[in-house]
Structure formats: structure tokens, C-alpha cells
Image (cartoon, grey):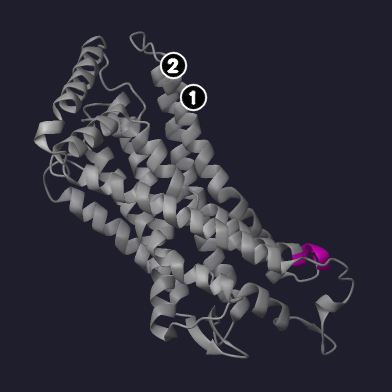
């Protein structure tokens, strides 16, 4: 997370004859008070809904982690990644409320930023690997899984993705610190070569967090949709458009953020390309699109879990087990009937894992 730096720092670095360049020709006035209210409400919504969804997903899927295939293993890691982002949101909610004042010290300034950025990358990495694993399991069943059920390969690859996310996060986090100006604030402020650092970090973010995963997700989902569409035994054509929804949601969450980032890179490299009003809108909207990108923490559990019949059945079975015995006979019967109907449906399909609901594989 590029913490509080752009609006405050970037404008102060460019001068024309000793006068800040942006005072010339700026006619737009943007209401930051309404933005603060909107950001707080967005953070609050993502925190409450995302926390509930991801805790449920991890709770249900963790119980069958030892028998889980690669897709389900990726789903657990995606939810863990999203959950770690969510638990840092109360700090940012209070920061927004107090207009970028940071009251929790230098340690939490660096740690919350590090947690945010690690999971900023890891969520996209695991989504990309999950989609690739899904494609290979449908079209090339004999191909060895990236995340096999047994063996060290699963944990080595999983640990490698988390370590790579940590490495990319440290590129930014080493320059994040608590700075005492009029009020204490948590900023990314390199002592030297601010523009070079910002452009480098933003470019790495664009490449590894968005362009690479998006290429894998969109390509594999298109190929999955074609495979499902050509399967004669699949009658539920919902699966064809559902995979395109996966790609669309990823783009809607991250494309606006990276467009703003790209324009900010251009502005840093040549401050006179964009007009003053355009630059003001860019820096005003950055925190808005950043908060909107967090909706992936709400969308992922719905798309990859709650739309899955196997996940819903597992959730019902787990809940039923916690109901007192004397009152759950009807619930058990309903759950059993649901599982039986799911089994009958599976028998009707020759291509049993053609369904594109991500967590249905191997369930």
C-alpha cells in the first residue's frame, strides 16, 4: 500500500523558479470531506462483510485441507490472504477519519503496511495459480498438479509464492516510516531518489500484481469456457458465463487502480504532460480506487466458494454437527438428500469435473 505519500510528497517535489508548479492553472476544487466519509464507509463494509465471509471459507475448507486438491488449497490461501488484509483495515479506517494522522507508532506503521502489501501480491498469485490448476485439471487430467495432495511440492510452491510476495512488499516497506510533520503520519518517503523509487515500485506492482496474473486468469478462463461449452454431457450453461465473471471481477477490482497508478508514473516522469486539474483529480481519486480494489476480499469468497454446491453442502453439514442432537434430525435428512442429489447429478455426467465452480473439484 502506498501509504499517504503521493498527495503530500509529489506536489512538493516539482518547482518552477522556486514556486510549486501546480499553482498555475489549477481551477478545480475537490471536496475531501465527502471523500473521507465515503472511504470510511467503504472500509467498514469490506471489513464487516469480508471478515465474515473469509472466516467461514477458511473454517469450512480447513477441515478438509489434508485431502484437498490444488484448487482448494489455493482457495484456502486466497482467503487467508484476503483475511490478513481485512484485519488491518481498522487502522486505515481510523487514519481516514483523522485525515491521515497516524497514532499507533512506528512499529504498527511498518507492520500494517507490510501485511497489506504482502497480501496485495499473494492474493493475485494464488488466484492465477488456482485458475491455471483448474484449467489443467479439466483439459489435461494426466498433467501433474502444481499443488499435489501429498508431498513437499505443495508446501515448497506455496512458501515460494509467499516469500516472493514478501520480497516485493519489502521493496516498498523499507521506505515506509512514521514522519512527524504537523501531525504524525505513516508515509513512504525515500531519503533519496523519490521519483525513481516510486516509478520502480509502481512498475513492479503493475507487472507482478496485475498484468501477469490477469494474463493467466483471463487466458485460462477463456480456455475453460471453451472446454465446458464443447462438452456434450454438460447441461448447465451457467458454467460458461461464470468463468468470464471470474475474469471480469478481477479486472473491475484492479484495472481502475492500475490506470491511476500508470498515469501517476507518467506525471512523475514528466510533470508537464498532464494538466494541473488532471493531476489534482488523479491524486484525489487514488485513495478511492485503492479502497474499491479491496472489494476483491468480498467478491472472492462468493465467486470461488458460496456459488459452489459442494461448499454449501459442507457448510450445512458442519453447522448441523453443532446443532443439539434432538433438534437436528430434519436438518441431517435435508443435508443427506442434498448430498445424494449432488451425487446423482455427478453420475449423470461423464465428464465429472467439467463444472467451472472452482471449489467443486475433488470435493
Q: Is residue 286 above or below residue 322?
A: below
Residue 297 drawn in magenta:
no
Magenta-tinted stretch: 273-280
Instruction: Label 2: state its secondary structure.
Output: loop
Residue under pointer 2: 237
Q: Position of residue 59 (x, y in %)?
A: 23, 47
Q: In this view, does 119 lie above or below 151?
A: below
Query: Which residue does the image show at 31% across and 37% down from the upper left?
Result: 133
Between the C-alphas of marks 1 and 2, the distance is 7 Å
Can residue 261 be seen?
Answer: no
Query: Which residue does the image show at 81% across and 70% down from the upper left?
Result: 272
Q: Where is residue 72 in the image (x, y as percent from the top left)?
A: 26, 40
Q: Where is residue 30 in the image (x, y as percent from the top left)?
A: 77, 65
| Of 325 and 354, the residue lying toward us | 325
Question: Which picture quadrant has residue 329?
Answer: top left
Question: Which picture quadrant has residue 106?
Answer: bottom left
| Of 119 and 324, the residue lying toward us | 324
Q: In this view, does 294 lie above or below 309?
A: below
Q: Position of residue 83 (x, y in %)?
A: 35, 56
Query: Which residue does the image show at 44% across and 59% down from the upper left?
Result: 120
Can residue 180 be seen?
Answer: yes
**Tally of numbered tags:** 2
Residue furthest to the front in view is 326
Left-right relation of 98 to 12: left
Query: Which residue does the image show at 54% across and 70% down from the upper left?
Result: 2
Task: From the image, give the main secondary structure of the stretch colored magenta.
Answer: helix
Left-right relation of 277 to 338: right
Residue under pointer 1: 241
Q: Are marks 1 and 2 in contact (CB under 8 Å)?
A: yes
On the rendered image, what quadrant is the C terminus found in?
A: top left
Instruction: Label 1: state its secondary structure.
Output: helix
Amino acid at each position: 500500500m502506498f501509504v499517504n505519500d503521493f498527495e503530500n510528497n509529489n506536489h512538493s517535489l516539482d518547482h518552477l523558479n522556486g514556486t510549486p508548479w501546480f499553482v498555475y492553472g489549477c481551477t478545480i476544487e475537490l471536496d475531501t470531506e465527502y471523500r473521507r466519509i465515503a472511504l470510511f464507509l467503504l472500509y467498514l463494509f469490506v471489513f464487516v462483510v469480508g471478515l465474515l465471509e473469509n472466516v467461514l471459507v477458511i473454517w469450512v475448507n480447513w477441515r478438509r485441507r489434508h485431502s484437498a486438491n490444488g484448487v482448494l488449497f489455493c482457495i484456502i490461501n486466497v482467503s487467508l490472504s484476503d483475511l490478513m488484509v481485512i484485519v488491518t483495515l481498522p487502522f486505515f479506517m481510523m487514519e481516514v477519519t483523522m485525515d491521515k494522522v497516524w497514532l499507533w507508532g512506528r512499529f504498527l506503521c511498518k507492520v500494517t503496511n507490510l501485511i497489506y502489501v504482502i497480501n496485495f501480491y499473494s492474493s493475485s498469485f494464488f488466484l492465477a495459480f488456482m485458475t491455471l490448476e483448474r484449467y489443467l485439471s479439466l483439459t489435461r487430467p494426466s498433467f501433474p498438479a502444481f499443488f499435489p495432495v501429498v508431498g513437499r511440492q505443495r508446501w515448497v510452491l506455496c512458501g515460494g509464492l509467499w516469500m516472493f510476495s514478501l520480497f516485493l512488499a519489502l521493496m516498498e516497506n523499507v521506505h515506509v516510516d512514521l514522519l512527524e510533520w504537523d501531525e504524525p503520519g505513516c508515509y513512504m518517503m525515500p531519503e533519496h531518489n523519490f521519483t525513481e523509487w516510486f516509478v520502480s515500485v509502481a512498475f513492479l506492482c503493475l507487472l507482478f500484481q496485475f498484468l501477469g496474473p490477469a494474463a493467466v486468469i483471463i487466458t485460462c478462463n477463456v480456455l475453460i469456457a471453451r472446454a465446458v461449452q464443447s462438452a456434450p454431457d454438460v447441461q448447465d450453461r451457467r458454467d460458461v458465463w461464470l468463468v468470464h465473471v471470474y475474469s471480469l471481477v478481477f479486472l473491475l477490482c484492479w484495472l481502475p487502480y492500475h490506470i491511476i497508478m500508470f498515469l501517476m508514473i507518467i506525471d512523475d516522469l514528466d510533470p508537464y504532460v498532464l494538466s494541473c486539474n488532471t493531476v489534482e483529480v488523479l491524486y484525489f481519486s487514488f485513495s478511492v480506487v485503492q479502497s474499491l480494489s479491496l472489494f476483491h476480499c468480498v467478491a472472492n469468497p462468493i465467486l470461488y466458494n458460496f456459488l459452489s454446491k459442494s461448499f454449501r453442502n459442507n457448510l450445512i453439514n458442519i453447522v448441523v454437527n453443532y446443532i443439539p442432537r434432538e433438534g437436528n434430525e430434519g436438518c441431517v435428512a435435508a443435508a443427506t438428500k442434498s448430498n445424494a442429489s449432488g451425487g446423482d447429478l455427478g453420475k449423470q455426467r461423464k465428464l465429472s469435473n467439467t463444472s467451472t465452480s472452482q471449489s467443486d473439484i475433488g470435493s
